[in-house]
Image (cartoon, helix red, strand yellow):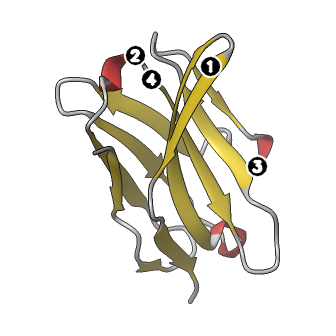
Amino acid sequence: QVQLVESGGNLVQPGGSLRLSCAASGIIFSIYNMYWYRQAPGKQRELVATITSGGSTNYVDSVKGRFTISRDNAENTVYLQMNSLKPEDTAVYYCNAVRTVPPVRVSFWGQGTQVTVSS
């Protein structure tokens, strides 16, 4: 049974920091590309950050320089360090594990964790 369990969401003031975690089980974590998405109320789900199985990273422009994605393959966990948080970062954050061996694409999602940035 595959599980992705996010944690670390909270209410934080603007300018504050949070670290989200996503613990995976039931998959060979190290061979999966990992993604953090977010979805704000009334908006579409947005890709925030990517880390490949090889460790390459990418970010949406709005979080570059503020967010850092990392992974610990020994702990089967992916992290999202979020600094200098803004009210517009408020959303439910989801982790996503993807493995593609053409033509098969396998994708698993976590349940999400709420991040609220407000004074």
- How dense is the environment of label 3, judged by Cα within 10 Å: few (below 14), some, or many (20 and up)? few
Q: Position of residue 60 (x, y in %)?
A: 74, 40
Give the CA distance from mark 3 to mark 2.
Answer: 28 Å
In the rendered structure, find residue 104 and report the number of the disc placed on it: 1
Give the CA distance from mark 4 to mark 1.
Answer: 13 Å
- Tag nearer the camera, 2 or 1: 1
In the rendered structure, find residue 32 and report the number of the disc placed on it: 4
Name the secondary structure under disc 2: helix
Q: Position of residue 18 (x, y in %)?
A: 40, 61
Marks 1,3: beta carbons within 8 A: no
Left or right, 106 with reference to 79: right
- Tag nearer the camera, 4 or 1: 1
Of the numbered discs 2 and 1, the one sitting upstream in the chain is 2
Marks 4,2: beta carbons within 8 A: yes
Residue topped by disc 3: 62
Q: Position of residue 94 (x, y in %)?
A: 53, 56
- How dense is the environment of label 4, judged by Cα within 10 Å: few (below 14), some, or many (20 and up)? some
Residue 95 seen anywhere in this rendered image of the structure: yes
Q: Amino acid at mark 1?
A: Val
Give the CA distance from mark 1 to mark 3.
Answer: 31 Å
